[in-house]
Amino acid sequence: MPLLIEVVEKIDDNSELLVALCKQIAIICKTYNNAKSICASDMLKLLETIGSNDDCDVRNKACSTLGEVSSLLCDEEFEEYYLPIVKRLCKGDLYPLKIGGSLLIPTCYSRIDQVTQTLLLSIYKDLSKDDTPMVRRAAATIIGKMSETVNALQIKTDILPIFQSLVKDEQDAIKVALIENSLPLFRLCKKEDSIEVLFQSVKACSEDKKSWRLRYIIAEILSQIVPSIDSDIATNCVVPIICALLVDSEHEVRSVMVSTLGGFSTNLNKDEYSKKMLPLLCEKTLKDSSEYVRISLAKVAGSLCSQLGNDQTKPQLFALVNGILADENSEVRINALENLSPLLSILNALKLRPYYYQQLNSLLWISVGE
């Protein structure tokens, strides 16, 4: 072990070797599967040293390995050897120590008593307000894991306030990390008041004109949030955000928003969804200056038609599909052709199939000619 410690000190700037060492430590510990020998050999302390490394990949791997090793410890050994490591890292003076400690908090929570849980939650709150942005970002990345670990009351009294604090952070990277890792929190916030608080924050982020990356990540994950919440709440909260992002100033945001549209109708009020969204697709998205946005629309048009097709939406769907098939860009038309299966079934239901057979025949000849 002294030799290993000496090696770590000499190669602390070689990230590949340190990551490889962490992998080997995990294998050794699992092979012996003896908690006392693990602690006696100072493996945990070695991983603690590596976990304070400046390199993000090294730190993440060391913390991941620490989590694996902790599962081999009995409760007494866990409290005696592992928990102090987490506390030391979280209370460290340097930001790499605090980041490493943050990543380990969720691995501890379910195995400690209520008093220690309260202490760790307090430490987590402090980390979420740390002066160093990297530490606050680390706190943001574990918001989902913490949500899955604490009880329902603690979600409302502790986790939600942390979320609200971080979502107002001045650093875009922190808000992006927070939204990206908040899916479990949305899923577990069953009460109407809690979920509406979350969506108010998300709506504010979707209107942040300074950060297109933040708006992009919201567009990307919205369809994953909707299935886990009440239909009425989802319709009232999500549809306005969708409509705003469909006309975003950045084509990357518009494109990803359009590409996820097929995943919303299962838990939204279809009439309200169609009423607000279809006019935007026909008037704005269909004529979008970016071919990438129109290609995204061509890919989801079939699923949208199959999900939303009825007598009321027939004129808009007709205009939408007709516009896609007549697009001047061949990639748009090709993507429409590649997604014909759901499209043809709904065209048949709407009694438009004969017309589109003629359109598709013309389209095929144009595509061949190109």
Image: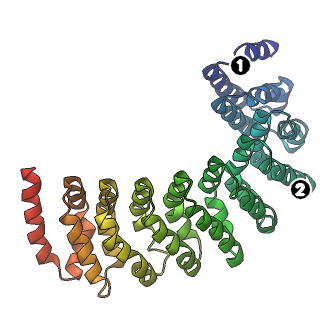
Q: Which residue is mark 2?
A: 118
Q: Residue at x 67, y 19 (%)?
A: 13
280 displayed left or right of 183: left
Percent across and percent down for residue 131 are 79, 44
Q: Is residue 265 above or below residue 52?
A: below
**Residue at the disc numbered 1:** 12
**Location of residue 277 in the rendering, given as x and y in whole percent from the top left corner:** 41, 75
Using the rendered view, name the quadrant where residue 57 is placed.
top right
| Residue placed furthest toward the right | 115
Q: Quadrant of residue 143?
A: bottom right
- Residue at image position (69%, 71%) is 197
Q: Position of residue 153 (x, y in %)?
A: 80, 68
Q: Position of residue 285 (x, y in %)?
A: 34, 66
Viewer-proximal residue, 131 or 154? 131
Q: Does residue 346 appear in the picture of this structure?
A: no
Sequence-first tag of 1 and 2: 1
